[in-house]
Every structure is written in structure tokens, then in C-alpha cells.
Image (cartoon, rainbow, N blue to C red):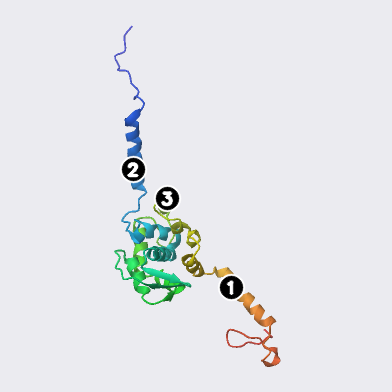
Amino acid sequence: MKLSTRPERRQAPPLRGTMREKVLESEGDRMSRENQLPQAEHGGGVPGLYEYAFLAGGGRRVVECALVALIERGTLSMRAARVRTVRDEQPAHPIDRALIAACSRSRSVTDVIEGLRLCPEIDALARRLVLEGLLHRRRGRPTRAGRRHLAVATSHAGIPAHVFKGPTELERGPVQYGLLSAQPIPHRLGRSLIRMGKALDHSHPDPDTDGGSAYSCGGGGSSGD
């Protein structure tokens, strides 16, 4: 009978103590690097804040987050849903600079958001997200990789909840009120409100007009429609 000369396969010993901790630590570092936003800037004082805001809510959410960050720094002031610059500052982030310049005079929050949500600075941020594969070019929505980055970021202690969920996560006060008052009315709801308004106009004729014609925002209309 011949004896086998093959060397026996030995199983790797289980990881114990510091060796296991080092392996887990290196794996955690790798996952962290994979989920970091590439080329993220310090918008609002937090790396990647505006990038996450765009992935979560588009250009409008970016402007909202910039407003909150600059108000907290004392650069902007908001009262009665109006905002203006109260302290000279030249921040490093271009979106912050654009917002400060836009608020040199008192403006309504709605005007500020609508005027900046498609500004060149935010457009450049969106293009960068598209190039990094985090945002769909045509649909303007996060890709699978973008959604993965958002999911990881929600557990990051340094990023406030309003970045992901909007002004409803802010504390009650003039800032939350101003941002909520600037929220757009959904298209279907807007049409429903317009129809309700017209129905009320027709059901309450103006007593100062002849023939019972009802008041209309368009400059007058017949009740016989």
C-alpha cells in the first residue's frame, strides 16, 4: 500500500482579537469610501450637503438648505416670509455667494427660491452629479448609485434631517414658516382650487352689476357660461 505524499490542506485559523478588528476596520473603511460623494464641496459648512440636497429634492431643496445654513450663520435674516442679507460675507461655495447676492434687498422667499433653483451654480452641481453617475441626465432623478448614497447619508450624524425631508423637519419658527409658505401647489390641486374659485364667483353675483353677471379675475364674465 502506497502512502499519499500530498500535503494536507490546512484551514485558516479563525480571526481573533486585534486581527479580526483590523479586518473589520479595513472593510468598514472601504465601504465608507465607496459611499462618499466624489468631489463634494463644503456647501453650508458640511461636505456634500448641497449634493445630498439635490439628490433628495432637486434645486429647490438646495436653495432651502442654503437659506437655512446662511440664516444660522447670521448672514441672512428671514421675517414674514421675506429674506435679506444682513452681514457681508464671501463664502467659498458659489451657491452661497449667489444666494447672498440675490438677497441684497428684501425679497420674498418664493422669489428667491424660484429665481435660484435653476441658476448656473446649481446647474453646475447637477451636471457634476450626472458625470459621477449619481443623477439621471434626462429625468433629473437619482440613479441607483445616487439612491444608495442617500440611504447611507441619512444615518450620518452631521447632516440635518431637513436636507432629506424638507422644511417640515425644521423647528417651528419664522424660517420654517417662510420655507413652507413658498412650497409650490401641486398641479392637480392648483386646478381644483381654480375651479372652486370660479364656482364661488358664479354663485355669488356682484350686486353692482346689471343682469347678475359674476366677478371674474379675467376682467368680467357672463354668468351664462
Q: Please, what secondary structure does the residue beneath circle 1 have?
A: helix
Q: Quadrant of residue 82?
A: bottom left
Residue type at the position of mark 3: Arg
Mark 1 nearby-residue class (10 Å; few <14, some 14–19, many ≥20): few
Q: Is residue 212 above or below residue 86?
A: below
Residue of label 1: 191
- The reply to whether callout 2 and callout 1 are in contact (CB within 8 Å) is no
The answer to which image quadrant residue 205 occupies is: bottom right
Q: CA distance from mark 3 to mark 2?
A: 15 Å
Q: Residue at x 43, y 49 (%)?
A: 155
Quadrant of the rendered image containing residue 141: bottom left
* Residue closer to the observer: 12 or 53: 53
Mark before the other along the chain sequence, 3 or 1 = 3
Q: Quadrant of the N terminus?
A: top left
Position of residue 160 relative to residue 213, above or below, is: above
Q: Is residue 64 left or right of residue 33?
A: right
Task: Give the mark nearest the N terminus, 2 or 1.
Answer: 2
Q: Amino acid at mark 2?
A: Arg
User: Residue placed at 41% from the left, 59% from the top?
Assistant: 53
Neighbour class for label 3 at 10 Å: few (<14), some, many (≥20)? few
Which x, y percent locates residue 16? 35, 27
Which kind of residue does numbered mark 1 sit on?
Arg
Please give left or right for residue 185 compared with residue 93 in the image. right
The residue that mark 2 highlights is 30
Could you tell me residue 15's position as x and y percent? Answer: 35, 28
Residue 113 visible in image: no
Q: Earlier in the sequence, mark 3 or mark 2?
A: 2
Residue 190 seen in the current view: yes
- Mark 2: give few (<14), some (14-19) or many (20+) Cα within 10 Å: few
